[in-house]
Image (cartoon, grey):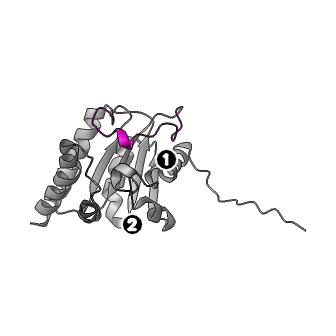
Amino acid sequence: MHVLVQQVNAIPMHKIEADIRKWSHEFLEVPNKKLNGLPPCPYAKQAWLDDKVMFSVNTGVDGLTKEVADFESHDYDIVVWANEVLPDMYYLDGWCDGVNEAMSIAGKDMHLMVFHPDYDAEEAGLDFLVEDGVVDPSLNYCMIFVQRLSTLDDAALSLEKSGYYEHFPADVYESLVIERRRLRNEGQN
């Protein structure tokens, strides 16, 4: 005899969360020859397995501000803020740069990383980080990853030794790795 059990408290997964999980599984976690055989995000798979990823979807800039304020109060490795109402890419990038600088000055171990659909990865020389057909083309959203700066920088130090950044353009490497390291070092002084 089969008994059907209905989960009363189950919350359906938002379509954007499902899309991000698919992108992670089918792209971020897959080895890439241009990254010395490492996946674009070598730590993503374990974060999912350890249930260390939290989502904030369509909460607007107020929701993002709340996630930044609350970040140190939980044990997630990453908060993925995603929004279908798209702020201007330069505004959002500048906002995150300002928060990152302020967190560094305050000695807070936090870093915001922007993903915006208007950013042209191919134009930036990161064509090896573009994979067509992985995300749902009917969805249009931006994301900000809220993470611990020390964790990101420690990972970058390890990845540097493996040749991971070998194919990154110098300006992108500077902004992704060296600038984060500067923020971390200044925040520790």
In terms of sequence position, does the residue under pointer 2 or pointer 1 come before the other? Answer: 1
Decide which of 62, 109 is in the foreground and name it: 109
Direction from residue 19 to residue 52 in the image, left or right: left
Picture quadrant where residue 94 is located: top left
Residue 122 painted magenta: yes
Q: Which residue is mark 1?
A: 23
Q: CA distance from mark 2 to mark 1?
A: 25 Å
Q: Is residue 122 above or below residue 30?
A: above
Indicate which disc residue 74 carries: 2
> Of all residues shown, which one is farthest toward the left?
189
Direction from residue 104 to residue 168 in the image, left or right: right
Location of residue 80 in the rendering, given as x and y in whole percent from the top left corner: 41, 51
Categorize mark 1 by other alpha carbons within 10 Å: few (<14), some (14-19), many (20+).
some
Q: Is residue 182 above or below residue 14?
A: below
The amino acid type, in three-letter code, at marker 2 is: His
Residue at (24% x, 41% y) in the render:
95
Numbered disc 1: secondary structure: helix
Numbered disc 2: secondary structure: loop
Q: Which residues are magenta?
A: 121-137
Characterize the magenta stretch by its predominant secondary structure: loop
Residue 115 can be seen, yes or no: yes
The amino acid type, in three-letter code, at marker 1 is: Trp
Q: Tell me the quarter of the image containing the C terminus.
A: bottom left
Indicate which disc residue 64 carries: none
> Of all residues shown, which one is farthest toward the right?
1
Decide which of 94, 132 is in the foreground and name it: 132
Location of residue 168 in the rendering, given as x and y in whole percent from the top left corner: 26, 46
Residue at (51% x, 41% y) in the render:
134
Picture quadrant where residue 69 is located: bottom left
Direction from residue 3 to residue 41 in the image, left or right: left
